[in-house]
Amino acid sequence: NWDVIDEKFTVHLNAHFSNLDLDGWLSHFANGHSIDINQFEGDSQYIKNPKKYRLYYGSLPMSLLRFRIPLKLMASKLFSKLKNESYKKSEIYLLGIHLEDDVNAFAYVKFDRYNNSNSIYYSAKALYKLIKVNSEWYITQISTYNNNEYSDKLVGFDKFWYPNKVNH
């Protein structure tokens, strides 16, 4: 599972996001599912009131029936914002995985965004909730955290597996 999830995030998802490939990036999400995005900000181990986005990946009528924002709309806005801030590329590093069962897992990553001067202008960690459908892993939830020592504690990183349990 490590190699499959590592390739999904560090190669495919990274390439689609770096190229601002909307359809490619959306292909990593579970179609026909609610998608939750939580942005935790703060430099302590106690974070209050995260920004929450309740999305749906599927048809517009189904999004409306579920009282959720279409994922494609949110992704279009995000990619447009990135184009306006001299975004060049991202690098994603898989830090660990936690398998709940055969079809549910979590992937914990660090990502850096680079501008046209090849400088990192944003760095964060993210916890992705995954579901396995037809032997493929898809995203159903993303929680982002500041890239600091508290994020590992907040996500329970000690319960995650990674090769040799080093480089975290």
Image: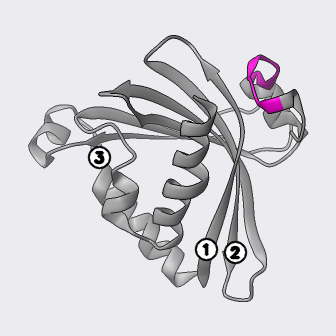
Q: Nearer the viewer, residue 49 or 104?
A: 104
- The answer to whether residue 50 is seen in the rendering is no
The residue pinned by badge 1 equals 89
Between marks 2 and 3 in the image, the one whose residue lies nearer the viewer: 2
Q: Does residue 112 lie above or below 138 as drawn?
A: below
Q: Nearer the viewer, residue 140 or 61?
A: 140
Between marks 1 and 3 in the image, the one whose residue lies nearer the viewer: 1
User: If you read the primary sequence from the N terminus, does the residue marked by circle 1 or circle 3 appear first?
Assistant: 3
Q: Amino acid at mark 2?
A: Tyr
- The answer to whether residue 81 is seen in the rendering is yes
From the top left corner, tell me how far across and down residue 160 is, in percent.
74, 23
Quadrant of the snapshot with the C terminus: top right
- Specify few, some or many for label 1: CA neighbours under 10 Å numbering under 14, 14-19, or 20 or more: many
User: If you read the primary sequence from the N terminus, does the residue marked by circle 2 or circle 1 appear first?
Assistant: 1
The residue pinned by badge 3 equals 69
Instruction: Tell me the CA gap for discs 2 and 3.
Output: 28 Å
Instruction: Tell me the CA gap for discs 2 and 1.
Output: 5 Å
- Quarter residue 122 falls in: bottom right
User: If you read the primary sequence from the N terminus, does the residue marked by circle 2 or circle 3 appear first?
Assistant: 3
Circles 2 and 1: CB atoms closer than 8 Å: yes
From the top left corner, tell me how far across and down residue 45 is, in percent.
84, 30
Residue 114, label in figure: 2
Q: Does residue 155 lie above or below 95 as drawn?
A: above
Which SS class for mark 3? strand
Which SS class for mark 2? strand
Picture residue at 42% right of the left edge, 75% below the top: 80
- Specify few, some or many for label 2: CA neighbours under 10 Å numbering under 14, 14-19, or 20 or more: some
Range of the magenta residues? 156-163
